[in-house]
Image (spheres, rainbow, N blue to C red):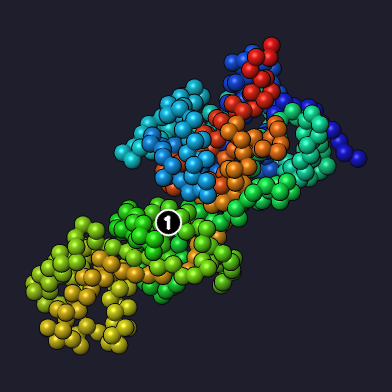
């Protein structure tokens, strides 16, 4: 038999950042309108908002001062642009300040708590839930949602049912399963025939075809530029790993290339999403100089030291491991064992070639690391499935927010900004649904 346990005004499926934000904002709306409102958060993990604790490497990157449509990847740019425009610029900082969280801004416009402690933000949110009498249940996974004539019934994995007037669905995405990532959005879309874009890892590492090169360069960090086949260029810090490229810029690139990731494969204990075809990426390791400038630098060092060693000559110009990996690849292509085989004139010509490679080095990307290593996912339920109040077109009283939607932001606080922005819009929609304007 099914067990019934209580009736609520709002049940929030998913206790991540967007779920907590929406619960608090809905409670605030109820207080403004002098309405009683019973809110329940259902979370399948043992703790609320686990991913929030990992945000910003534990510093909790709460948002960004400047947010534009270009900071996101989505299949419906126009719809997302309208959504972002409806959130006041001052709202994020005001929201956190009202919870007793002081905000500071770094040189890139990223917003952090003054303490730079994600745990402090997490504690403030949990405390605020209690202050607004919001209820929550942990280790509770919803397996069935039924729309009835005037309400919704939600059944968990133990057969326990709860009813409510409205639902906010914010279970997150498939990214970071160890922190609560799941496929709830995919299951809901399939069950209710919603437009849905297959989820792929985003904000994750790029995998190189040439594993030998990546292993030789592993651990080398550099500030440079990367150009994709589309012509888009990215600047910032990169890090070579045994598998490929990581770092903030590489993760942003993974979000852009996410839709090209097709098949899932497991090779030598590693899990990847492989691209449908190899993606070229051109790296510039010395963006401060052009090819001629790099050549003059190497030539002057060679004239001074008389050493036919590219790694030594390029010291202070690019990281040693990268210079070594490039020069080793050149030796292999030229079928040489050492540069000492070259005469003076030939070596000077070789330095000219290496100068070009340091400024424009093409590698091939085979795919992305799996959801286990991804911070977010690209894809999800289509924005076109929603009304402007974040409710489903065909399900009155059913609202969505957060990462389960087809919106993926780049690094820098943009994903947490969308979690808060979508919660803000959904809370307004829930309030208008429960207490229509003009009704006593």
Which of the two residues, 359 or 100, is positioned nearer the viewer here? 359
Residue at x 32% of width, y 53% of height = 236
Residue at x 31% of width, y 58% of height = 225
Measured as percent of width and height from the top left, residue 362 is found at 34, 70
Specify whether residue 326 is in view. yes
Residue 342 shown left or right of residue 87 in the figure = left
Residue 365 shown left or right of residue 238 in the figure = right
Specify whether residue 11 is in view. no
Number of dots carrying numbers: 1
Q: Please, which residue is most extreme toward the top here?
A: 440
Residue 416 shown left or right of residue 154 in the figure = left
Q: Please, which residue is most extreme toward the left here?
A: 304
Judging by the rendered image, the residue that carries numbered circle 1 is: 253
Which of the two residues, 324 or 276, is positioned nearer the viewer here? 276
Measured as percent of width and height from the top left, residue 132 is found at 62, 21
Q: Quadrant of the C terminus?
A: top right
Measured as percent of width and height from the top left, residue 363 is found at 37, 70
Using the image, determine if residue 105 lies above or below residue 364. Answer: above
Using the image, determine if residue 360 lies above or below residue 398. Answer: below
Q: Secondary structure at mark 1?
A: helix
Choose top left, top right, bottom left or bottom right for residue 356: bottom left
Residue at x 51% of width, y 35% of height = 83
Using the image, determine if residue 267 lies above or below residue 284. Answer: below
Q: Quadrant of the N terminus?
A: top right
Q: Residues within 10 Å of mark 1 (few under 14, many from 20)?
A: many
Residue at x 11% of width, y 77% of height = 306
Measured as percent of width and height from the top left, residue 336 is found at 27, 87
């Amino acid at each position: 038999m099914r067990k019934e346990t209580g009736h609520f005004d709002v049940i929030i499926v998913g206790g991540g950042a967007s779920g907590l934000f929406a619960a608090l904002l809905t409670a605030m709306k109820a207080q403004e309108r002098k309405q009683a409102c019973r809110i329940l958060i259902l979370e399948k993990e043992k703790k609320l908002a686990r991913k929030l604790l990992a945000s910003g490497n534990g510093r909790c990157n709460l948002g960004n001062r400047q947010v534009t449509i270009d900071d996101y990847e989505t299949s419906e740019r126009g719809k997302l642009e309208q959504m972002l425009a409806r959130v006041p610029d001052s709202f994020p900082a005001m929201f956190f300040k009202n919870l007793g969280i002081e905000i500071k801004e770094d040189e890139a416009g990223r917003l952090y708590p003054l303490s730079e402690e994600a745990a402090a933000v997490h504690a403030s949110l949990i405390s605020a839930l209690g202050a607004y009498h919001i209820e929550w249940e942990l280790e509770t996974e919803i397996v069935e949602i039924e729309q009835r004539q005037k309400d919704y019934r939600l059944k968990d994995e133990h057969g326990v049912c709860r009813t409510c007037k409205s639902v906010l669905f914010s279970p997150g995405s498939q990214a970071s399963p160890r922190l609560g990532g799941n496929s709830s959005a995919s299951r809901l879309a399939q069950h209710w025939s919603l437009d849905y874009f297959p989820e792929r890892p985003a904000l994750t590492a790029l995998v190189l075809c040439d594993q030998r090169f990546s292993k030789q360069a592993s651990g080398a960090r550099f500030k440079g530029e990367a150009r994709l086949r589309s012509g888009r260029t990215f600047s910032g810090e990169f890090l070579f790993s045994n598998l490929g490229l990581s770092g903030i810029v590489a993760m942003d690139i993974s979000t852009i290339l996410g839709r090209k990731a097709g098949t899932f494969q497991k090779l030598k204990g590693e899990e990847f999403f492989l691209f449908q075809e190899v993606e070229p990426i051109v790296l510039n390791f010395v963006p401060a100089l052009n090819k001629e400038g790099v050549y003059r630098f190497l030539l002057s060092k060679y004239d001074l030291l008389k050493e036919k060693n590219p790694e030594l000559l390029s010291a202070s110009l690019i990281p040693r491991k990268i210079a070594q990996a490039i020069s080793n690849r050149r030796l292999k292509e030229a079928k040489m064992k050492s540069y000492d085989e070259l005469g003076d004139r030939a070596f000077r010509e070789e330095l000219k070639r290496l100068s070009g490679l340091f400024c424009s080095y093409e590698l091939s990307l085979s795919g992305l690391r799996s959801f286990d290593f991804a911070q977010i996912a690209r894809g999800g339920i289509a924005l076109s499935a929603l009304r402007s109040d974040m409710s489903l077109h065909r399900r009155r009283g059913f609202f969505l927010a957060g990462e389960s939607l087809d919106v993926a932001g780049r690094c820098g606080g943009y994903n947490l900004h969308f979690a808060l922005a979508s919660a803000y819009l959904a809370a307004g929609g829930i309030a208008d649904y429960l207490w229509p304007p003009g009704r006593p």
